[in-house]
Amino acid sequence: MSKEIEVSIVTPMHNEELCVREFHTRISAALRGMGASHEIVLVNDGSTDSTPEIIRELAKQDPNLRGVFLARNRGQCTAIYAGIQQSRGRYVVIMDGDLQHKPEEVPSLIEEIRKGWDLVSGRRTDRSESMLLRRLPSRIANWMLRRSSGCQVQDMGGLSVLKGDLARSLQLREGHHRLIPALIHRMGGSVTEVPTTAPPRFAGKSHYGIGRSVDVLFDIVMLWFQNSFKQRPLYLFGRAALLLFLAASAIMTWLLYEKVFLGEHMGTRPPFLGAILLYIASLGAMSTGFILEALGDTLDSVLNRKNYVIREIVQQQNDETEG
């Protein structure tokens, strides 16, 4: 399209037949109200109800709506990633289609990111979900994410908007949609948040369960690993190998002392066998670090991945003209 698009709405849809039309009506009204050129990218994530038919119907009526249909259900993060890659806007808004992210609050996030932020996240207030099943696990996860990433966003799983070019440069894996503010912060991007509300689902049944908390825990551990060792696996496994080697050497030194000065036999004693196992574990940890380093270098080369954000380029202007 020759017309520049300012805002792309990216929304995954999985069996949301009761919400699609209401979502489209309200987000379209909100964007028209702020006078922003826009597109709405609805990603059908392998729905088995009438969601695909409704998206096709709406696309025929609204030239600003684009339907992206995945071949089968791949999960929320993959659907979001597919939608981001199909987006063309200067800003990309990531939001749910069940209307727990209010479309009417999108303009406030757009106004904030226009000030120059790389990402603006919505901090959900007065959440109506169950304290035990949703709110408490969310608070714990957000606290752990802040501790592990250094990103001070209070609510990383809510409505968010980020610069389009930055969004399309992300390599999202399953579960990363919950970490986007932390990922942007890790790259050096500027992040902030504004308060938003969190109404109940408009219709239908939630797709979330308590089992998701286990996945979030593993995601946090991986993020901590990446942040703590500057994406260099050798730093972590090298330290582990060194500690194992020193422990094994200390045991061997003690055993040799007892053999030389006390006449104790060392070859069949349990500490000797333990030291040998520690030496082997040390070698294994170091080898793992080398292997992961090689794999990481290969992946970065193939993907041409850049783990940084350029804030500004300053260059002296040459005022000389050819004559």
Image (spheres, rainbow, N blue to C red):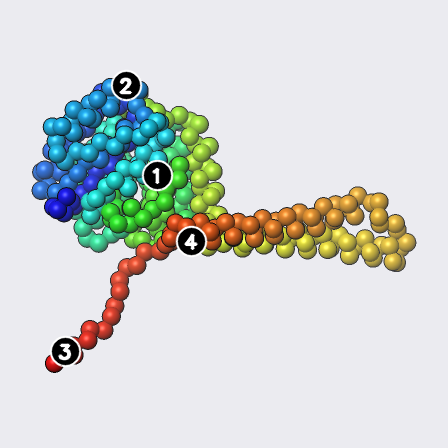
Name above or below for residue 319 compared with residue 196.
Answer: below
**Which residue is at the front of the view, 320 or 161?**
320
Percent x, y of residue 312: 26, 62
CA–CA distance in space, label 3 to label 1: 50 Å
Residue type pointed to by label 2: Asp
Residue occupying image coordinates x 18% and y 50%: 114
For the view shown, which residue lies furthest in the right direction? Answer: 263
- The C terminus, quarter of image: bottom left
In the picture, residue 256 is in which quadrant? bottom right
For the view shown, which residue lies furthest in the front direction? Answer: 323
> Upstream in the sequence, badge 1 or badge 2?
2
Q: Which mark is residue 321?
A: 3
Dot 1: within a 10 Å radius of its alpha carbon, few (fewer than 14), some, or many (20 or more) residues?
many
Q: Mark 2 points at which residue?
A: 49
Mark 2 falls on what kind of element? loop
Mark 1 falls on what kind of element? helix
**Which residue is at the front of the view, 57 or 138?**
57
Mark 4 falls on what kind of element? helix
Percent x, y of residue 20: 21, 25
For the view shown, which residue lies furthest in the bottom direction? Answer: 323
CA–CA distance in space, label 4 to label 1: 24 Å
CA–CA distance in space, label 4 to label 2: 41 Å
Dot 2: within a 10 Å radius of its alpha carbon, few (fewer than 14), some, or many (20 or more) residues?
few
